[in-house]
Image (cartoon, helix red, strand yellow):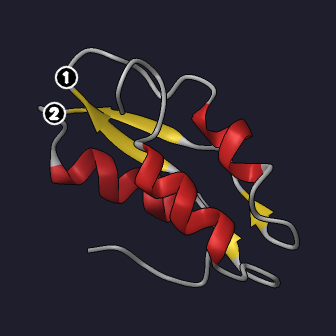
Protein backbone atom coordinates (compact mmCIF):
# COMPACT_ATOMS: atom_id res chain seq x y z
CA UNK A 1 0.00 0.00 0.00
CA UNK A 2 1.23 3.45 -0.88
CA UNK A 3 -0.69 6.22 0.87
CA UNK A 4 -3.77 4.00 1.12
CA UNK A 5 -3.68 2.99 -2.54
CA UNK A 6 -2.69 -0.27 -4.18
CA UNK A 7 0.22 0.03 -6.63
CA UNK A 8 -0.94 0.76 -10.20
CA UNK A 9 0.34 -2.63 -11.40
CA UNK A 10 -2.34 -4.25 -9.22
CA UNK A 11 -5.05 -2.18 -10.91
CA UNK A 12 -3.67 -3.14 -14.31
CA UNK A 13 -3.84 -6.82 -13.38
CA UNK A 14 -7.33 -6.55 -11.92
CA UNK A 15 -8.78 -4.85 -14.99
CA UNK A 16 -7.17 -7.28 -17.44
CA UNK A 17 -8.15 -10.58 -15.78
CA UNK A 18 -11.61 -12.20 -15.87
CA UNK A 19 -12.66 -12.66 -12.22
CA UNK A 20 -16.18 -13.90 -13.05
CA UNK A 21 -17.21 -16.45 -10.43
CA UNK A 22 -14.10 -15.84 -8.30
CA UNK A 23 -13.93 -14.75 -4.68
CA UNK A 24 -11.49 -12.00 -3.77
CA UNK A 25 -10.32 -11.35 -0.22
CA UNK A 26 -8.08 -8.26 -0.13
CA UNK A 27 -5.34 -8.00 2.48
CA UNK A 28 -2.10 -6.16 2.92
CA UNK A 29 0.75 -5.53 5.28
CA UNK A 30 1.80 -2.03 6.10
CA UNK A 31 4.51 0.07 7.56
CA UNK A 32 2.48 3.23 7.98
CA UNK A 33 -0.38 3.64 5.49
CA UNK A 34 -3.64 1.78 5.71
CA UNK A 35 -5.72 -0.15 3.20
CA UNK A 36 -7.61 3.06 2.40
CA UNK A 37 -10.13 2.94 -0.42
CA UNK A 38 -8.18 0.35 -2.40
CA UNK A 39 -10.72 -2.48 -2.04
CA UNK A 40 -13.54 -0.26 -3.32
CA UNK A 41 -11.49 1.00 -6.26
CA UNK A 42 -10.23 -2.48 -7.16
CA UNK A 43 -13.73 -3.94 -6.85
CA UNK A 44 -14.88 -1.55 -9.57
CA UNK A 45 -12.38 -3.23 -11.92
CA UNK A 46 -13.59 -6.80 -11.32
CA UNK A 47 -17.15 -7.33 -12.48
CA UNK A 48 -18.55 -10.74 -11.69
CA UNK A 49 -16.33 -11.34 -8.65
CA UNK A 50 -17.49 -11.78 -5.07
CA UNK A 51 -15.58 -9.61 -2.61
CA UNK A 52 -15.15 -10.24 1.11
CA UNK A 53 -14.05 -7.58 3.58
CA UNK A 54 -10.37 -6.80 3.55
CA UNK A 55 -7.86 -6.82 6.34
CA UNK A 56 -4.74 -4.83 7.06
CA UNK A 57 -1.91 -6.43 9.04
CA UNK A 58 1.05 -4.66 10.54
CA UNK A 59 4.50 -5.74 9.46
CA UNK A 60 4.92 -7.27 12.91
CA UNK A 61 1.79 -9.46 12.72
CA UNK A 62 2.30 -13.02 13.82
CA UNK A 63 1.41 -16.07 11.77
CA UNK A 64 -1.21 -17.04 14.37
CA UNK A 65 -3.06 -13.74 13.90
CA UNK A 66 -3.19 -14.14 10.14
CA UNK A 67 -4.16 -17.82 10.39
CA UNK A 68 -7.01 -16.94 12.75
CA UNK A 69 -8.28 -14.32 10.30
CA UNK A 70 -8.13 -16.69 7.32
CA UNK A 71 -9.96 -19.38 9.27
CA UNK A 72 -12.65 -16.87 10.33
CA UNK A 73 -13.60 -16.11 6.72
CA UNK A 74 -15.79 -19.20 6.41
CA UNK A 75 -14.01 -20.41 3.29
CA UNK A 76 -13.60 -24.07 2.43
CA UNK A 77 -9.93 -23.98 3.47
CA UNK A 78 -8.00 -24.19 6.68
CA UNK A 79 -4.82 -22.20 7.17
CA UNK A 80 -2.12 -23.75 9.30
Against 47, is 52 above or below?
A: above
Residue extending farthest to the right is: 48
x and y percent of residue 63 in the render? 18, 53
Give the camera-side residue of 68 and 3.
Answer: 3
**Which of the 4 quarters of the picture holds residue 50?**
bottom right
- Name the residue tied to disc 1: 31
Check disc 1 and report its element: helix, strand or loop: loop
Label 1 crowd (10 A; few <14 / some 14-19 / many >=20): few
Quarter occupied by the C terminus: bottom left
Tags 1 and 2 in contact by the CB under 8 Å rule?
Answer: yes
In the image, is 15 to the left or to the right of 31? right
Q: Residue at x 32, y 51 (%)?
A: 66
Check disc 2 and report its element: helix, strand or loop: loop
In the image, is 24 to the left or to the right of 64? right
Q: Residue at x 86, y 66 (%)?
A: 47
Label 2 crowd (10 A; few <14 / some 14-19 / many >=20): few
Q: Residue at x 40, y 18 (%)?
A: 3
Against 75, is 27 above or below?
A: above
Give the camera-side residue of 44 and 51.
Answer: 44
Residue 74 appears in view? no
Against 44, is 17 above or below?
A: below
**Which of the 4 quarters of the picture holds residue 38?**
top right
Residue 58 appears in view? yes
Give the camera-side residue of 80 and 44.
Answer: 44
Which one is in front in this view, the residue at disc 1 or the one at disc 2?
1
x and y percent of residue 60 in the render? 12, 32
Q: How far apart, in angstroms, are the residues tagged by discs 1 and 2?
A: 6 Å
In the image, is 55 to the left or to the right of 25? left
- Name the residue tied to disc 2: 59
Amino acid sequence: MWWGEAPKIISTFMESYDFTGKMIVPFCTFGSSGIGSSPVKLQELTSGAEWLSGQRFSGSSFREEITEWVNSLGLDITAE
